[in-house]
Amino acid sequence: MARTKDPAVRTLLLERAAHMLRTREPITLRSLVAGTGVSTMAVYTYFGGMDGMWKALRQEGFTRLGARFTTMTMSTDPVRDLTTLVAAYLRNALDHPDLYRVMFDASFDLEDLKAADATLEYMVQAVQRARDAGRFGSGTVPLELAIQSWAIAHGLVSLVANGPLPRRTLDHGVPMLTALFVSSGDRPDRCRRSVELGWQHLFPPEAPSLGVGQDAAMP
């Protein structure tokens, strides 16, 4: 009888590999499992070998991002919802900084490129809703504005999650997104309010919201 796979073992190995990459530790079959309590055979059992593990490692970041997006409750305000998705993207990176670093490393293939692309599609659909609602101009290209929104998020979190700047740097996201959305046709006052409401999802109620001049220890 085949032995049942334990998802926790797979997650353990993926998170250990991501951490080793960030700390620049040499990763071999033996070093990966050292101290984990599992044998080298686990790498073959769960990934088919080291090549499969590298693919799974990069995919895992997008898998967790997609899972977070599916929990987002959309409102009647599409600009707020687009901002909520940006905030969720940032939160995912802050919660999983090691995996985030690997997500965009093209040195490794992805297990499922379409599943990774689907995460961007959430933002594309939010832009489409905003354009259809008249918040953005009729000439707005949903994919382009979604990529621009993603780029703002990626730039900010790269400087914070695995970079040199303090968490309060993320506060710049509100004026940056507001400027982007206003340039796409939204009214400044209404846009700012929508962005501020969506941005609240970056720091859930149980976590302290960081304003300008505040900082906190990295996760």
Image: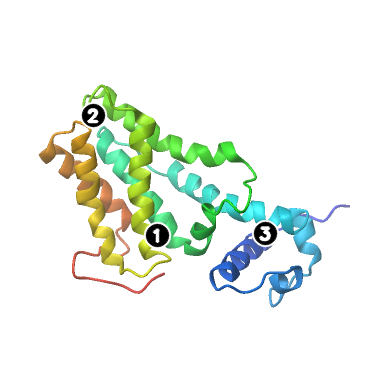
The residue located at (23%, 38%) in the rendering is 181
Which residue is disc 3 drawn over?
A: 10
Q: Residues within 10 Å of mark 3 (few under 14, many from 20)?
A: some
Q: Which residue is labeled 1 in the image?
A: 158
The residue closer to the viewer here, 52 or 202, is: 52
Tell which circle, 3 or 2, labels the residue nearer the N-terminal end. 3
Q: Is residue 184 left or right of residue 21?
A: left
Nearest to N terminus: mark 2 or mark 1: 2
Q: Secondary structure at mark 3?
A: helix
Outermost left residue:
189
Picture coordinates of residue 13 (x, y %)?
A: 66, 64
Q: Amino acid at mark 1?
A: Ser
How far across and down, in percent of the image, does residue 114 sit?
Answer: 57, 36
State how far apart marks 2 and 1 are (Cα): 28 Å
Q: Are marks 3 and 1 in contact (CB under 8 Å)?
A: no
Label 3 or label 1, whichever lies nearer to me, is: 1
Q: Whole-Å distance between the Cαs marked 3 and 2? A: 43 Å
Residue under numbered circle 2: 136
x and y percentages locating residue 62 in the rendered image: 52, 48
Q: Nearer the viewer, mark 2 or mark 1?
A: 1
Give the vertical position of 27 relative to 69 (above or below).
below
